[in-house]
Image: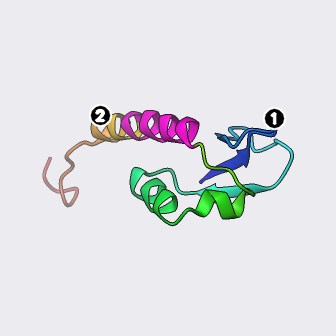
Amino acid sequence: MLRLVNDGSGSSAVVVDERRRMTGRGAWLHPSEKCLALAIKRRAFGRALKGAAETADVERRIARGTTAVDTLVAAATTVQPESGSEN
């Protein structure tokens, strides 16, 4: 889960709180493009974070994170026998 917070500088930007330590009200989002699209469609950021609407930072983070995770999973996948008798 990603913790999101309002930028705090008076702008409407939503930023990812990587260390989960930033002050202020936070919102949580599953790090997938599908969940991000649904949150934008429902205007969830504006309600959860008091007027926040600029999600470019969150979109970049999710796009960067999903490709890295998919690559690691594909590289780590190995084919193993069903039982231990196929040696």
Does residue 61 belong to the magenta stretch? yes
Please identify the quarter of the rendering in which residue 50 is found.
Answer: bottom right
Callout 2 secondary element: helix
Residue identifier under label 1: 9
The front one of 75 and 33 is 33
Relative image position of residue 46 (x, y in whole percent): 65, 58
Is 53 on the left or on the right of 34, as rendered? Answer: right
Q: Report the side of 66 relative to 81 (left or right).
A: right
Horizontally, residue 40 falls left or right of residue 6, namely: left
Residue sitting at x 50%, y 50%: 31
| Residue interval drawn in magenta | 55-68
Q: Is residue 76 left or right of residue 15?
A: left
Residue 44 at x, y = what percent? 59, 63
Nearest to the eye among marks 2 and 1: give it.
1
Q: Quadrant for the N terminus, please.
A: bottom right
Q: Is residue 5 above or below residue 60?
A: below
Q: Position of residue 81 (x, y in %)?
A: 18, 53
At 68% across and 50% down in the image, what residue appears?
52
Quick one: which residue is furthest to the right in this view? 23
Q: Of 41 and 71, which appears nearest the observer? A: 41
Q: Nearer the viewer, residue 53 or 34?
A: 53
**Up-down: is 38 above or below 68?**
below
- Residue 76: which numbered mark, if any? none
Q: Residue at x 43, y 56 (%)?
A: 37
Three-letter residue code for mark 2? Ala
Specify whether residue 24 is painted magenta. no
The residue wearing badge 2 is: 75
Report x, y in % for residue 19: 74, 38
Would you identify the image quadrant in which residue 9 lies? top right
> How many other residues sit within 10 Å of disc 1, few (<14), some (14-19) or many (≥20)?
few
